[in-house]
Amino acid sequence: MKLSLGPIQYFWDRDTVMRFYERTEELPVDIVYLGEVVCAKRRALTTKDWLDIADRLAARGKEVVLSTLVLVEAASELSRMRRIAENGRFRIEANDMAAVSMVCNRVPFIAGPHINIYNRETLKLIADLGAIRWVPPLELGGDAIAQLQSQRPEGMETEVFAFGRLPLAFSARCFTARAHRLPKDSCQFCCADHPDGMDLETREGQQFLALNGIQVQSGHTVNLLPELPVLQELGVDVLRLSPQSKDMETVISWFRRAVDDDAMLEEAAVAVARAGSASPCNGFWRGAAGMDWLAGLNP
Amino acid sequence: MNRRLELVCPAGSMPALRTAVDHGADAVYLGFRNATNARNFAGLNFDNNDMRRGIEYAHQHGARVFLALNTYARVGQWADWTRAADTAADLGADAIILADPGLMRYCRERHPTLRLHLSVQASATNPEAIGFYARQFGVQRVVLPRVLSLSQVRYVISGAPVEVEVFGFGSLCVMVEGRCALSSYVTGESPNTCGVCSPAKAVRWEEAGSVRRSRLNGVLIDVYGPGESAGYPTLCKGRFVVQGGADQSPAYALEEPTSLNVLGILPELLKSGVAAIKVEGRQRSPAYVGQVTRVLRTALDACMHDPDGYVVQPEWIVELDRLAEGRQHTLGAIERAWQ
């Protein structure tokens, strides 16, 4: 089973991103997804910067994938996406049909979690178009994924979002700017001040959601490490760990140990549960409300 | 200019269909009574007999019928979705509104002459994505997600080889439709999977003294003081506290309860080449559908008759605001400042 590091969802400054991926060169992940997926205005790194990072990671034996923007509205966004899609060296993760359109029937690609694949027929379609790996929609339950595993097209790899805050929704509106009472068009890049998003709580102080620019995330952090035996039994090929600003190295290393050695699972689960600051959830995987944390044996 | 803007109205039931047609809808859209459409609410929608009668009634009165088959087929239940498509084709629906690419391929192969519309739930917001659906499946119309500004709508029209339908009135989705799992995060059910958002069965109202609280699966969505009017607790329209934000008191962090209303920019939409205006609200009463259809019919006729002389009549706005969520309206993302 491979581990991947998903694209950074937040607006971290250039130095932080550079340092993060320098460290990643040494970390036990097999696949690294790079690039801005949330907001086209975030340009701390140029396309060349991303490709340089990609080269360095590839030189250290990592599989590098370039992730593309989820909400695509402008001509400039499409032309940037086309440059990424036609880079000629690295595969892309399509998060919108525009990206699928640019690569299908031409080069193999990864269908990201925002391409809506909910059934065997659509999975077959996306495979026919050239997808070699898919990330199920985040709300798709473990039972559905299990059924699709038994029917998946030959050669199709499955990657499950296993750790991190879930990117649940996208809007035209920038919620971070709204929270700071700034217009989107002069947002002052205020999202840079919130390396894990802004916590949104109910009036009873319940941790609920997180605001990350035009994206709304889960307040809780998905943690599927305790489900590892089932994920392995199902033949899931890749577990995706989504970058958070704190304790990422700890999370990666404990996932690695648990994947490589069954005996480490319990210890790893405790360590990962302590990492980060948000409380855990696994409801989507268990077929329940996504925010729920259902402990105990997998049904 | 000799362009026409088609008025597409919701039909959640036979009486709603009749009243929409009677009040001047050019087309109505409707769904079967199951999870195959995005308004899968108790007591709504059509069985086969109603569907046949509804299509007959609409056609007799010169209106078209679009079948909304716009959820994503569930694993193991594919036949429910294909059966709905087959039935709609047999009954003579004028188009099927689809979101699931696998289902589009099925319809293209099985019903090659059937007109396909791309549902808003397919999240297609740019010419490249729309072009993909046109090339792959022969899609002839796209319903645009409510996230584009007017200039972005124009950009889509200039680059996409299909007709463009935009929402004109009704509840406002703040998120890109088809890419929102907020409802399933809270309740386990979402538009994509179950055809519902913030489902009624997860709603609980609590009254304590003069204060009312609305909850969705236990999560506090809003609190209403004495005299405050309380709306349906759609989770993105509640009041919350954002840590580190400018407001330390609870605020509408995502969106207020409000309705979309594009009457103010009808001439711009007409001139930009929009093909159709859609009214949201299959869950609404026939009376609501009748009133909204009548006002929009009047406004569209005035606009098409003389776009440059078109003026929004105050009584249209008064009548629509009375029906609107939160009794107020917005242009939503069409207006850049909203974003």
Image (cartoon, coloured by chain):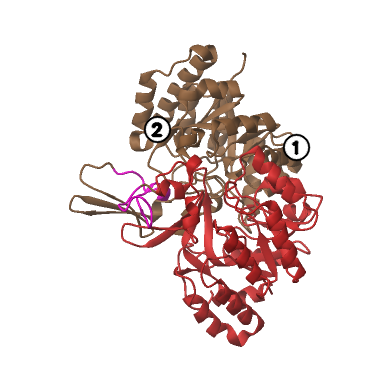
Q: Secondary structure at mark 1?
A: loop
Alpha-carbon distance for marks 2 and 1? 41 Å
Does any portion of residue B189 appear in the rendered image?
Answer: no
Residue at the disc numbered 2: B329
State the SS at label 2: strand
Decide which of B89, B213 is in the foreground and name it: B213
Specify the label residue B47 is tagged with.
none
Asked whether A146 falls inside the magenta stretch, the response is: no
Q: Nearer the viewer, mark 2 or mark 1?
A: 2
Chain bearing tag 2 is B
Observer-nearest of A92 and B94: A92
Residue found at the far left of this picture: B209
Circle 1: residue type: Pro
Tell me residue A51's x, y (percent).
72, 57
Question: How many numbered circles are shown?
Answer: 2
Residue A31 can be seen, yes or no: yes
Measuring from the top left, give residue B244's x and y in whole percent: 38, 56
Q: Colour of chain A?
A: red
Q: Chain of mark 1?
A: B
- Above or below, comparing residue B271 to residue B48 in the picture: above
Horizontal placement of B249 versus A190: left or right? left
In the rendered image, the quadrant that contains the N terminus of chain B is top right
Residue hosting label 1: B112
Q: Classify residue B154 as left or right of residue B25.
A: right
Q: Residues within 10 Å of mark 1 (few under 14, many from 20)?
A: few
Label 2: how many residues lie within 10 Å, few (<14), some (14-19) or many (20+)?
Answer: many
In magenta, the rendered stretch is: B230-251
Three-letter residue code for mark 2: His
In the figure, the shade used to draw chain B is brown
